[in-house]
Image (cartoon, rainbow, N blue to C red):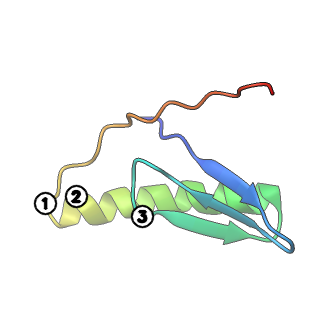
Amino acid sequence: MRYGVVIEQGETSYGAYVPDLPGCVAVGETLEEVKELIAEAIQFHLEGLREEGVAVPVPTSIFEYIEA
């Protein structure tokens, strides 16, 4: 499955979260680092859901860029 990830640049770091996986977040000093960390966080989150016997959410979020 492919999950959409939102990455936001802060003053000193980058934050990432997955709208379809509440609580799945990561923070890194660089864009590359946060991408690696959120990929690991997704795997860890999904493993935790499976271990708890909770259904893994199907990705439903749609991401689109809108020009303004």
Q: Quadrant of the C terminus?
A: top right
Residue 50 bears which disc, if any? 2
- Image coordinates for residue 29, horizontal then vertical, percent: 81, 71
In the picture, residue 28 is in which quadrant? bottom right
| Picture layout, residue 53 above or below residue 5 | below
Residue that appears at 56% across and 54% down: 39
How far apart are labels 2 and 3 at the CA level? Answer: 10 Å
Q: CA distance from mark 3 to mark 1?
A: 14 Å
Amino acid marked by disc 3: Phe
Determine which residue is flagged by label 1.
Answer: 53
Tag shown at residue 44: 3
What secondary structure is marked by label 1? Answer: loop
- Name which residue type carries label 1: Gly
Q: Where on the picture, by quarter, is residue 35?
A: bottom right
Q: Are marks 1 and 2 in contact (CB under 8 Å)?
A: yes
- Residue at horizontal 86 percent and vertical 72 percent from the top: 11
User: Cβ–Cβ below 8 Å for labels 3 and 1?
Assistant: no
